[in-house]
Amino acid sequence: MLSNIIYDNFMDFSIQFDTPAVPEQGVVIGFGVFDGVHPGHRLIMSNVSEMAASCGAVPAAVTFVPHPRAVLPGMEAPELIISVEERLKQLRLAGARITGIIPFTPAFAALEPESFLQKLREHPGFILKGICIGEDWRFGSRGKGDAVMLAQYCREHGLLFRAVERLTYQGENISSSAIRLLAGQGELKKAAALLGRRLSLTGTVVRGFRIAGKELAAPTANLQLDHGVIVPDGVYAGSARISGENFPAVLNIGVAPTYQVGERRIEVHLLNFSGDLYDRKLEVKLLEYLRQEQKFPSPAALKEQITRDIAQATVIYNKEGNKEEEDDQRTWNRHCGNQPHPAGD
């Protein structure tokens, strides 16, 4: 959790850190939105850790909230792959000892690149020792700041600097945008390969129509989505996590045409679970697409299909869903083993 330590000496610039006190030996900061914390982001943080070790500093990651596209004119905010809280957690797992958030406001977006960097160097909350970014990261008013400008600035002010090359996986650039696009196209396996772990939907269980429990003997949790990229309508095998425990699950995303509900919903049937889920947080990992949503001639016919869906989802979960996530080193090797090392400091 973030502390309430906010260094806001500047009207247009503040950082909120997750630690009460930033170490006095200084920090090397990796900057980015980092939505999803995919392998490319992890490579940035690996470089941040190397740079920090070389100068006795602490590795840090600073992200921006809300997403810049939610603030910049003429742009539309994307669906977030993961929550901000999960983003900070994943950045720590990737090597950051400190994480921070810069509120992305119109005033901040209007800062000239040189002004932003000067404020970083003069910031009362920490001593800046270095900066690491992805090679195509842009910042400052109208995106005028880039890797070339940053490299020159850091040389002139005695700061370490690295611009990390973009990662690819099987010829595909790894980016949050690419992951969102693949998810929206229903390419679950390819999106998961780029992300480095399975896609998930996270939300709060709210009250629905209670049809599935009464007529279909398959009660569902009606998920009000907080975070996650919506995939195409259909029925999916999943792994649901509630209060730290995993359960096999069947998801239906769509409008429930047999009952002519009309409203698009995410319904999750947890297998082998009993208890009240209302108002509780639920995370569901998407394992595999099963079939398209369809209108059945009767509730009895739908009930028979649900039985088949449950059987198929159970097989998939037993094969894939209850496995532990690959350890960091295996995932790292899979995505980064053949990548060139970025340019020196």
Image (tube, rainbow, N blue to C red):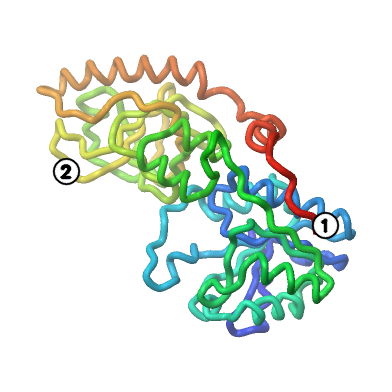
Looking at the picture, how far across and down is residue 276, in whole percent?
40, 36
The answer to whether residue 238 shows anywhere in this view is yes
Q: Residue placed farthest to the left in the image?
A: 297
Looking at the picture, how far across and down is residue 95, in whole percent?
74, 48
> Where is mark 2, residue-wise?
262
Contact? badges 2 and 1 (CB < 8 Å): no
Neighbours of disc 1 within 10 Å: few (<14), some (14-19), many (20+): many
> Where is mark 1, residue-wise?
52
Residue at 41% x, 45% y: name it: 181
Q: Is residue 156 or residue 81 the one in the foreground?
A: 156
Quarter of the image holding residue 20? bottom right
Judged left or right of residue 4, residue 71 is left
Neighbours of disc 2 within 10 Å: few (<14), some (14-19), many (20+): few
Judged left or right of residue 299, residue 284 is right
Q: Is residue 143 or residue 247 the one in the foreground?
A: 143
Q: Which mark is residue 21?
A: none
Residue at 61% x, 65% y: name it: 101
Q: Amino acid at mark 2?
A: Gly
Which mark is in front, 2 or 1? 1
Regarding mark 1 in the picture, which secondary structure is present there?
helix
Q: State the count of labels.
A: 2
